[in-house]
Amino acid sequence: MEFFTLHDFMTYSKGITYLVMGAILVFMPLYWLYLTDRDD
Amino acid sequence: MGQEKAITEKQYFTPFNVIAGIIILVGLIISILRFTKGIGAVTNLDNNNPWGLWIGFDLLCGVSLAAGGYMTSSACYIFGLKKYHSAVRPAILTAFIGYALVVFALNYDVGRPWKLPYPIFYSQGTSSLLFEVGLCVFLYLTVLFVETTPAAFEWLGFKKIRNWVVRLTLVLTIFGVVLSTLHQSSLGALFLIAPSKLHPLWYSGYLHVYFFISSMFAGLSMVIFEGTLAHKWLHDKMDETHLAESRGVVLGFGKAASFIMMGYVGIKVIGLAVDNNWHYITTGWGLWYLLELIGFVLFPAILYSVGSREKNTKLIRIAAVWTVLGIVLNRLNVSLIAFNWHLPSAERYFPSFMEFFITLFIITIGVVVYRFAVTKMPILYEHPEYKEDH
């Protein structure tokens, strides 16, 4: 990926960051359920 | 007479005592060299690498692995998880010894021990992160000392003052959590001043967050690891309550560590995305980074999760050792291995034999003090006169 302006860079990196954050927000509650579903 | 002497000699000349004695003796000789001939006589430090093993391991690893104190006491006294009560005293004692040895080790690095109180009482550098770390460690060491005293007072029979100190428990716990949040993160923030020296995969604007979050699972893992060692070597010092609660502590702390570690992996990936550092992953440094993140964070997190679901404490104990090694690797990566990464190999730092030995000397002092404390004081058992208090 080539960047010509700071705006290009920010758009790209922030776009990826938001996608990663969304994935984490979905994953973490599911992981908690996985960790605790056998609790008494 | 002869038999008594033989028994006494047998008690004193155990393999542990002999090995610890030799290490301490050699350590004292190197200490004399350090404080008479200067830091250059015993270390490989230079102007490019002013911080070496004593900062990277003794201080950074020491502080993060001592985080079990604030994690356990906050779980028990702030979140009300009383089922972990038996783990509080050993964790607080380990934290106190850990922080005391951090301050002790710092003297080897900075020299002139009589000037150690200067930044706190004489000349405060209020704009410096190092000042904040120093102040927090000074205050937190005091808090840990006060938190440790009830066990000592119970041992010595000072009932009145012991009861008075126990009333301060909640305040001290809150104070401890606040101070730990500050200085655990600030230790990472120290490296924010060196973006050109630290490899981009380890340098991040979130470095302070990484240090704080990783200290949480470091502390939890250290409590499990230390409990494993205590069960093996100090089993006879534990009472029924401690033995009965230990399984719950391992399962609960393992689960918590697993969840936090997964979150940590998540924020590390966010750090990669924010700085767009993906292209470094395919380099040699990238493989080393992946070994740290996948091999020593993600993998033990999965081990923890499987162990806590299957109620397999052995698996959790293995994961704890793995995680402790991972924390050591991370702190050494940030402070030594990935630091000055661009320098030619001839100018890179590698600790001298004497630096390694002083580190071993300090760890040995910690083990000897811990062993003395748990042998004499009610750390792994409840004092019969105070059972109704818990």
Image: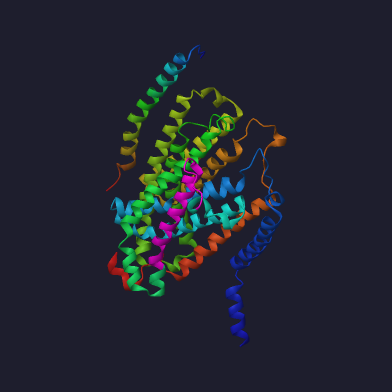
Q: Magenta residues, as a range?
A: B122-151
Residue B257 colored in magenta in the image: no
User: Residue B312 at x, y = what percent?
Assistant: 40, 49
On the question of residue B248 being in view, the answer is no
Q: Quadrant of the N terminus of chain B?
A: bottom right
B248 on left or right of B328: left
State which quadrant residue B385 falls in: bottom left
Nearer to us in this view, B280 or B106: B106
State the colouring used for the structure image: rainbow
| Prevailing SS of the magenta stretch | helix
B14 on left or right of B371: right
Q: Quadrant of the C terminus of chain B?
A: bottom left
Q: Which residue is the extreme one toward the bottom? A: B1
Residue at x-position 40% and y-position 57%: B143
When the figure is inspected, residue A20 is found, relative to residue B348, above or below; the finding is above
Nearer to us in this view, B283 or B298: B283
User: Residue A19 at x, y = what percent?
Assistant: 38, 22
When the figure is inspected, residue B132 is found, relative to residue B11, above or below; the finding is above
Q: Which residue is the extreme one toward the top? A: A4
State which quadrant residue B237 falls in: bottom left
Residue B139 colored in magenta in the image: yes
When the figure is inspected, residue B251 is found, relative to residue A15, above or below; the finding is below
A18 on left or right of B116: left
When the figure is inspected, residue B324 is found, relative to residue B275, above or below; the finding is below
Residue at x-position 66% and y-position 64%: B25
User: Residue B252 at x, y = what percent?
Assistant: 35, 49
User: Residue B70 at x, y = what percent?
Assistant: 39, 51
On the question of residue B34 being in view, the answer is yes
